[in-house]
Amino acid sequence: MAFRRHLGARRGDVALGAWSVVLGILMLAPLAAPGYVLSYDMVVVPDQALLPSSVGVSSALPRAVPLDAVVAIVDDVVPAALVQRLALFGVVVGAAWGAGRALPASSTPYRLVAASVYGWNAYVFERLVIGHWPVLIGYALLPWLLIIARRVRAGQPGAAAGGVLLAAVAAVTATGGILTSTFFAALVLAPGGRQRRRTKLGVALALVALQAPWIVPGLVRPQAAVSAAAGVEAFAARADAPSGLIGSLMTLGGIWNAGAVPGSRALMASALLSGVIVALALAGARELRRRMNRVEAVVVPVFAAGGLVLAAAGAVPGGRDVIEWLVTQVPGAGLVRDGQKFLAWFALLLAMAAGHGTARIVKAVCRPGTRAVPRLIACGAVLLPLAALPDLAAGAAGRLTPVQYPQSWAQIRTALHESSAPGDVVVLPFQPYRSFPWADGRTVLDPAPRYFGVEPVVPDALPVGGSVVPGEDPRARRIDAALTAERPLAGLAAAGVGWIIVLRDTPGEVPGAVVAGARRVAHYDEVELFRVPGPIRPWTDVPPRGPIVAANIVCLATLAVASVDLVRNAVLRRRRSIGSLVS
Amino acid sequence: MGNIGGIVAAIVGVVLAGLTVITAVNVSEPDRSGDSGTVSEIDLIDYDRL
């Protein structure tokens, strides 16, 4: 009997894993083509260089820290294009698989429902298309952290170390770190459980240490890490479905950028199908609560509610005032202005509850002993998320197709690296986003600063909805002013800029005085490289290196300790199991 | 309960199948000027400045 149960569970795991892989293939099949996927903030380049700004030694806010450093190191071993595919595929498969596994005490068909709801929804579409793949790493790890937290609370040796290592993967960016570490900390540190007090303290300290590489550069920068109030309205969630703002958020959509919204969201039929998923979740909420342990039954709903509140806050009167105060007064609070990303916590609750909701429907409408109807209902519920959002298939309906960088970019990079002349680089037109013909004209964050391997100065003022959200980097502001000044090149040299790259195949103005006065070093097709004449004054108004290096050492030491603990416990477990077999 | 439940499930299934077909047929050319309002009116990346 026990063997049958074990076999059934094993088959269930295989089915869940297989379905998760199928979802990944359906969604990301176009990535089988060679090249790099560029979409809004998703920028991958062939060989990203490890620069001071990669760890936060820069006048800009540490938005992609330490992500840029991790990518720069990893792509020395694994090609960047492969890293991108592994990350995206891992996110989709990991999210679906994790949600199915995390569903407490349920049979395989309902685990598949949870997997579909969590792996295939508007949140995944919108964050993929807008290029926030590090946020999706955190999203995918949430259910796994829930599973590991159960083991930690059960007193399983090594589980805490495993959780810390998973949280570290998400902590490559601030949002991923906050999404996962707060959730894991709440589950592990809540009163009760069999874990020792030492374990709790260790987890708490480790989770803080993991955030150090992005927190410290923000804290020690010469200017306070606060943002403009204008960004709150621009990045607030908004209705992307006929069901209005709350309906959009409840069905996991509502991103601020209309360009990242799937076309199906505008359809009433899709809204009704999404509404059925929410109804399933409502039907299963009580059963889910009953099957979760006491701590989960509090932490998971509280985080879900918190995610909904954060997502809606910037879009409703009163809430917007609070968010505006936070982002303008509290350093680092700019992270909450795009609050829709915190729906990740709500998505996990929705997915698990939908699984149990399906079970409840089956129980309500089917006579005991019947098999065909329950299977049909479960099958329908598994496919419901795909029916509601069919345009997530095939690379988000073609928005995630790989492209190739022009050969001229590599030639300019070589020319730049052959020179030892000092100075950082600016790329003109001086705008954060591009629209290249070789990238199907899609809007994409300028890949040039990462591509050319020289420390860049990047504009961080964002043109959004007819207005401009001011940036936080004083150096970028200074360069923006210098470009329109009477003697632009003197202004650039005084701001530490020695190189100018001009991209001619993207919209935007290139100041004539800049190009006329600078010396052209190389010119390949639509890309030109210029040298700023005269002495270049190094830019020193950056965060001090000492605390940033120390923060990274602390983080790496934490990873080392967690890895050793994980391996040690795995070896001990293996020895024990061999010992029990022998005796 | 079983028979009635089965009939209700079948009706719901047919309705959902219909909605699925409608979504799939229309998704290739989404009409963004319809009910969602904000989607059609707000194009938040300012392409003119690009």
Image (tube, rainbow, N blue to C red):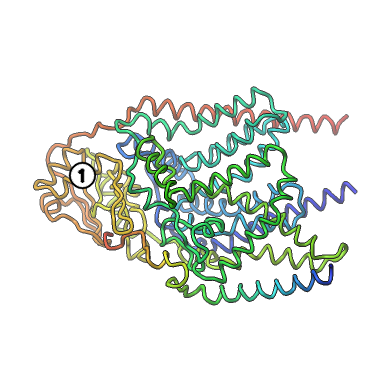
Viewed as shown, does residue A523 lie left or right of A391?
left
Viewed as shown, does residue A35 lie left or right of A455?
right
Q: Which residue lies furthest to the front in this view?
A: A318
Give the secondary structure at mark 1: helix
Residue A581 location, x and y as percent? Answer: 85, 34
Query: Closer to the camera, A506 or A239?
Result: A239
Residue A47 location, x and y as percent? Answer: 39, 47
Viewed as shown, does residue A17 lie left or right of A502?
right
Q: Residue furthest right?
A: A1
Residue occupying image coordinates x 71% and y 38%: A294
- Mark 1 nearby-residue class (10 Å; few <14, some 14–19, many ≥20): many
Residue A93 location, x and y as percent? Answer: 60, 54
Q: Name the residue under label 1.
A: A479
Chain of the residue where label 1 is placed in the rendered structure: A
A147 over A393 or under it: above or below: above
A242 over A496 or under it: above or below: below
Residue A517 location, x and y as percent? Answer: 10, 50
Identified by mark 1, the residue type is: Ile
Q: Is residue A124 visible?
A: no
Task: Report the quarter where the C terminus of chain A lies.
Answer: top right
Residue occupying image coordinates x 64% and y 26%: A199
Viewed as shown, does residue B13 lie left or right of A472?
right
Tell how many labels. Answer: 1
Q: Which residue lies furthest to the left in this view?
A: A486
Q: Is residue A24 visible?
A: yes
Query: Closer to the camera, A143 or B32?
Result: B32
A100 over A226 or under it: above or below: below
Residue occupying image coordinates x 34% and y 49%: A451
